[in-house]
Image (spheres, rainbow, N blue to C red):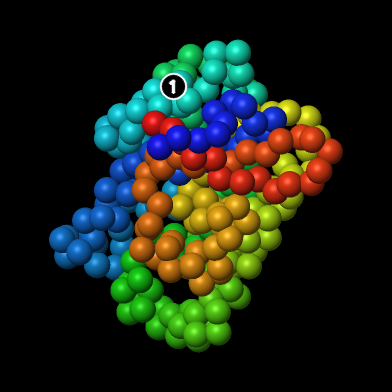
């Protein structure tokens, strides 16, 4: 597949990728096969300390090798943004090692995954069976668009976050980079929910698309997308870059 410009030819570039596979991802994918996981995942995906699986480390290494092919030696990454979760920082370590870069790593909370409050490691069935009142509220909100329900906090967990709150913070981050006037090449390592939220702007996804794709986990681990624009005195939004690999 050909493209008119290489990734490094754009003045401003944002490369985004979902973190590589974690031990929590493995637990999530076996929930239907393990009766002990019917209500609670054995490893909660909302735990900031969850680490990459062995397969995840291989995925991150492969992503780094791919980016090394896509980036010119004379146009290195200016920065790597990660969330407050260890899995994004660990992914960044593997990617940067393979690229051979020492770019600045910046912790950006607006890339965090959507907060789930006291439901932080519960399955949908678990919420339905144990917190039936809250599940009913969630279903009612989903019927009206799904933007305004926030899981309650509890047991040391912060209050949950609505999709509207998630959209607001990722929109703010996107707008901040749209206002920048200097050239940059930035890599963002995020989560399923925050990545899909960002794609509302760059890929024109609807809120309904985001919610459905999040529930179906339609962005794979270590998936890479890139967006660029030129600085020529005209306002242009970031457009998808076809990765010629």
Name the spot of residue 195 as percent of width and height, x first.
52, 51
Image height of 42 relative to 79, above or below: below
Task: Give neighbour class at mark 1: few <14, some 14-19, many 20+ (Cα, 10 Å).
Answer: few
Secondary structure category for the residue under label 1:
helix
Q: Residue at x 54, y 40 (%)?
A: 241
The C terminus lies in quadrant: top left
Which residue has dot 1 on it? 69
Q: From the top left corner, tell me how far across and down residue 1 is, in percent.
A: 40, 37
Report whether 38 appears left or right of 217: left
**Left or right of residue 189, residue 202 in this image:** right
Q: Where is residue 107 in the image (x, y as percent from the top left)?
A: 62, 35
Q: Which x, y percent locates residue 96?
A: 48, 22
In the image as oriented, which residue stretches furthest toward the right?
Answer: 233
Residue 74 or residue 144, whichever sits in front: 74
**Residue 107 in view of the camera:** no
Location of residue 91 with respect to 37 vertically, above or below: above
The structure residue drawn at horizontal position 42% and vertical position 63%, both measured from the top left corner, is 213
Q: Is residue 114 visible?
A: yes
């Amino acid at each position: 597949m050909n493209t008119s410009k290489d990734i490094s030819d754009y003045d401003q570039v944002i490369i985004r990728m979902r973190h590589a596979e974690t031990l929590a991802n493995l637990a999530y994918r076996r929930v239907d096969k393990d009766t002990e996981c019917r209500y609670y995942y054995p490893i909660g995906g909302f735990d900031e300390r969850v680490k990459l699986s062995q397969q995840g480390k291989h995925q991150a290494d492969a992503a780094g090798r791919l980016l090394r092919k896509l980036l010119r030696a004379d146009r290195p990454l200016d920065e790597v943004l990660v969330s407050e979760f260890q899995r994004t920082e660990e992914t960044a370590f593997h990617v940067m090692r393979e690229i051979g870069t020492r770019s600045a790593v910046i912790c950006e909370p607006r890339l965090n995954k959507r907060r789930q409050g006291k439901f932080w490691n519960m399955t949908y069935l678990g919420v339905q069976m144990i917190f039936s009142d809250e599940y009913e509220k969630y279903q009612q909100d989903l019927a009206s668009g799904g933007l305004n329900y926030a899981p309650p906090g509890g047991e040391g967990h912060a209050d949950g976050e609505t999709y509207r709150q998630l959209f607001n913070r990722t929109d703010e981050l996107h707008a901040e980079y749209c206002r920048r006037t200097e050239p940059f090449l930035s890599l963002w390592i995020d989560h399923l929910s925050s990545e899909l939220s960002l794609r509302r702007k760059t890929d024109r996804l609807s809120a309904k698309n985001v919610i459905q794709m999040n529930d179906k986990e339609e962005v794979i681990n270590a998936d890479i997308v890139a967006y660029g624009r030129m600085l020529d005195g005209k306002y242009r939004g970031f457009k998808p870059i076809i990765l010629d690999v």
